[in-house]
Amino acid sequence: MSDEILTKQDGPILRITLNHPVRGNAVTDEMVAHLTQLINDAPKTSDLVVLRGAGKDFCVGRAGMGSRPAVEPTAYARRNFSDVVFDAYGAMRNCPVPIIAVVQGGAHGFGCAIAAACDVTLASDKATFSVPEMAHQIMPTMVMSSFVDRVPRKAMAYLVYSMFEVSAERALSYGIVSDVVPAAHLDATVDKLTAAMLKAPTISLRSAKEYIRSAPDMPVAGAVEYARNLHATINSAAEIRKPRT
C-alpha cells in the first residue's frame, strides 16, 4: 500500500500522491481507506494538504468498477460496503485544514467526486471530468453526494445522465473546479497558491474552512451571526498574531 499512495511532509504542507499511473490512479477500496486515514491525520502535522495523481491522470475512478460479486450482498451489507467511499468524502469535507486538489488529466467517477469534495481544485486546461457510473450499471449517488453542496442541479443531472466527459472550463462553470490554468503552468500555480495561503496564520486557515463548510447551510441571519462571533473570537486569539517560523 505504501507505494500506491505516496506522502511527503513539506514543512506545513502534506503532499499526497495517488501513485498507480498505469491504471490512471484508479483506486481500490484499500487505497480509499488509506487516503481517508491520511486526511484524518493531516491536521496533526500540517496546515495544508495538496492531493494529486502521478502520471498523466488525476484519478479515473475505482479499480474494477462494474464488476459484480458472485453473490449479491443484501442492501444492508452493500450500505456498509459503500461506507469506505462516503467516509473519504466526509473526511475531505470535515478535515480542519484546507485540501487542494491538482487535476492534470482525467478525473472520472471517484476522481471527479474527490476533485469536487476538496476545498480548492486547480485544473490543467487538458483535464477532463465525467461521471460514467450508470454505463457500468452502478447507481451514481456516491459521486452525487460529493456534488450536493458544490454542483448545481442541472449540471449534476447532465453529468450523471449523459456520462459525457466535460472540459476543465465546463467543470469550472459547474463548481467542481476553482480555476483552470495552462498545463505548463499548473505546478507553478499550485506553488503560488500554497505560498499565498501560508501567509495566513494556522488559526485563520482553519476558521475560514469552518465557516465555508457550515455557513452556506444556515439561514442568512444565522450565518451573519456566526461570522460576527467567529470574527471576534479568532481576531482576539493570541495565535493570530504569531508570525510563522
Image (cartoon, rainbow, N blue to C red):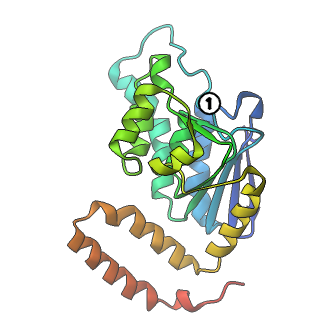
Q: Secondary structure at mark 1?
A: loop
Q: Residue at x 62, y 26 (%)?
A: 63
Q: Residue at x 51, y 13 (%)?
A: 68
How many labels sit on residues?
1
Q: Residue at x 61, y 45 (%)?
A: 35
Quarter holding the N terminus is top right
Quarter holding the C terminus is bottom right
Q: Quadrant of residue 64?
A: top right
229, above or below 140, in the image: below
235, above or below 6, in the image: below
Residue 129 percent across, percent down from the top left = 56, 38
124, above or below 128, in the image: below
- Foreground residue among 128 and 225: 128
Residue 98 percent across, percent down from the top left = 55, 63
Disc 1 crowd, CA 10 A, few/some/many (<14, 14-19, 20+): some
Q: Residue at x 40, y 62 (%)?
A: 213
Considering every residue shown, the one lying at the far top of the view is 70
36 with respect to 7 (left or right): left
Residue 115 percent across, percent down from the top left = 55, 47
Q: Provide the residue designation for mark 1.
A: 28
218 with respect to 127 (left or right): left
Which amino acid lies under the numbered mark 1 shown in the image of this protein? Thr
93 with respect to 222 (left or right): right
Q: Quadrant of residue 19?
A: top right
